[in-house]
Image (tube, rainbow, N blue to C red):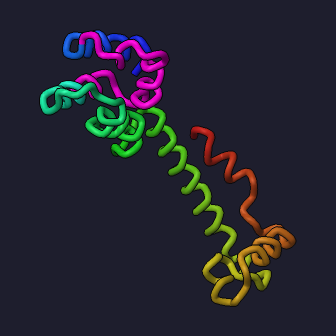
Amino acid sequence: MTLKDVHDLFDLLEIYFSGHPGLTAKNIRSAWLSVLEPYSREDVKKAITQYLRSSTNFPRPQEIAVLCPAPVAERTRAEPQIMGPMDVTAKETQERLYTAWKAERERLIPLRHAAGLPATMDEAAAAGMPYTEWGLALGRAGLDTPERVWREGVTKP
């Protein structure tokens, strides 16, 4: 909702409540906007129509807000998102990165075993070695996953 939308709503309310002090009270339209701003114009108009069908009293913005569906931003957040072109590209990049990481892990497993180190996180956990200690030991031995894997995984083949 915008302030112009609120002015339009007050034009509608003027038809039903001509001369009502709520139509001309100072800052009333700004107050309405502060309550109804998150809602769409269409939802507020439907809510006012619903309110007018069941009440002869001048409405308060809170009474209209409770008749509106969730604000547009909340509905958008809650709805499942369909993958767009950027998402497909991100998924392809993620798959390339995972493939590069798996290949490097397979190459490093025998080298880590030969150095007397757990080859995977699961092996480290089974040996009672905390993840940070395992990662530091791999780094000292030069057997951690090299930075190039992450760079190559995000560049297109």
Q: Is residue 26 magenta?
A: yes
Residue at the far bottom in the pictured view: 127
In front of the other: 119 or 33? 33
- 96 relative position to 141: left or right: left
Q: Position of residue 143 (x, y in %)?
A: 77, 69
Task: Decide: is 59 above or below 22.
Answer: below
| Picture residue at 57% right of the left edge, 40% below the top | 157
Question: Of residues 87 and 141, which is closer to you in this image?
Answer: 87
In this rendering, the answer to whether 98 lies above or below 141 is: above
Total marks drawn? 0
Compared with 147, 63 (above or below) is above
* Residue that sits furthest to the left in the current view: 53
Which quadrant holds residue 137? Answer: bottom right
Looking at the image, which is closer to me, 56 or 76? Answer: 56
Would residue 96 be visible to someone looking at this image?
yes
Quadrant assignment, res 57: top left
Q: Bounds of the magenta span?
A: 18-46
Is residue 111 covered in magenta? no
- Answer above or below: position of 134 versus 104: below
In the rendered image, residue 119, in percent from the top left (x then y), is placed at 68, 78
The rendered magenta stretch, by its main secondary structure, is classed as helix
Among the 4 quarters of the image, the one containing residue 55: top left
User: Which residue corresponds to the image point at 36% horizontal and 35% vertical from the top-left?
Assistant: 62
Picture coordinates of residue 86, whole percent (x, y): 48, 34
Task: Return the x and y of residue 28 as percentages of the image width and height.
Answer: 43, 20
Q: Is residue 111 visible?
A: no
Residue under the point 58% across and 51% down: 97
The N terminus lies in quadrant: top left
* Residue beneath the point at 47% across and 28% down: 34
